[in-house]
Amino acid sequence: MYAVIKTGGKQYRVRPGDMVVVEKLAGEAGAEVSFDQVLMVGEGDAVTVGAPLVEGALVKATLVETRKGEKVKIFKKIRRQGYRRTRGHRQFESVLRVTSVAGAGQSESWDGTVDLTPLAVLHARARNLKTLAESLMAGSSLLPVVEDAPAKTAPAKKPAAPAAAAEAPVETAPAPEAEAAPAKKAPAKKAEAAPAAEAEAQAPAKKAAPKTAAAEAKSDEAPPKKPAAKKKPAADGGKA
């Protein structure tokens, strides 16, 4: 049994158990959706056509997911003008699983289980990306799911010693009496040098020897003059 429904300004031919992609509908995954705008209901030759709708006809479906469709590119060009523009658009769409069709005294339902796995997860599983599929199912971003690290616990402190043991006096051995250190002897060299220095200081200074008469006479005499240099004779070729 099939039916023709109208939603989002478009018409769709559906059967129980079919998966249909329609314009975006309000609701979350797993919600039940009903369509009362049924244009045709029937099976084989027994077909009922509405004018414009079939009275009492109803189609029920389950919302699987709401996603973005394939990208549509819009390219504009004006020749000989250097004008080119490219734009893209992705329309939101809802995926439905038809569960029952009823109208014109007939009804049919689908007894299967609705799988709410989104298309992105199916693609990830097909590419053997298990981590990505798990993150998508968890409703998180495309980053892999990382388990929280266990919290670090502080190390247990050692039990403190009992107070009685801490207060107990500690026996110490008596310190030995310090032995008398021998007196240091003064260096002999310094003691011997002292009287010699005192003797030199007390001794009278020596007077300089008087000069003799011969030495004074020598000092008074003038130094001898140097002989004058002899003139060289003139050359033979010179004038007389």
Image: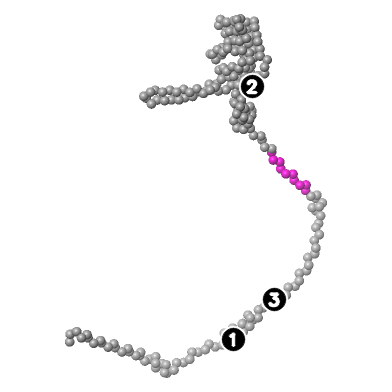
Instruction: Locate residue 151: give its quadrant.
Output: top right
The reply to whether callout 2 and callout 1 are in contact (CB within 8 Å) is no
Label 2 neighbourhood size at 10 Å, few (<14), some (14-19), many (20+)? some
* Local SS, label 1: helix
Q: Position of residue 8 (x, y in %)?
A: 55, 15
The residue that label 1 is drawn on is: 199
Q: Nearer the observer, disc 2 or disc 1?
A: 2
The residue that label 3 is drawn on is: 184
The residue that label 2 is drawn on is: 116
The reply to whether callout 2 and callout 3 are in contact (CB within 8 Å) is no
Tell whether position 154 is magenta. Answer: yes
Q: Report whether 189 appears left or right of 172.
A: left
* Local SS, label 3: loop
Q: Position of residue 84 (x, y in %)?
A: 41, 25
Instruction: Locate residue 197: give its quadrant.
Output: bottom right
Give the magenta-colored segment's residue range. Answer: 151-160
Is 168 placed above or below 238 here? above
In depth, the one of 15 and 141 nearer the eye is: 15
Label 1 neighbourhood size at 10 Å, few (<14), some (14-19), many (20+)? few
Q: Sequence-wise, which precedes: disc 3 or disc 1?
A: 3
Identified at 61% across, 25% down, the residue is 122
Identified at 73% across, 75% down, the residue is 182
* Local SS, label 2: loop
Q: Sequence-wise, which precedes: disc 2 or disc 1?
A: 2
Q: Nearer the observer, disc 3 or disc 1?
A: 3
Identified at 61% across, 7% down, the residue is 43
Q: Quadrant of the N terminus?
A: top right
Give the alpha-carbon distance from disc 2 to disc 1, as whole Å: 125 Å
Q: Quadrant of the C terminus?
A: bottom left
Callout 2 amino acid: Leu
Q: Sequence-wise, which precedes: disc 2 or disc 3?
A: 2
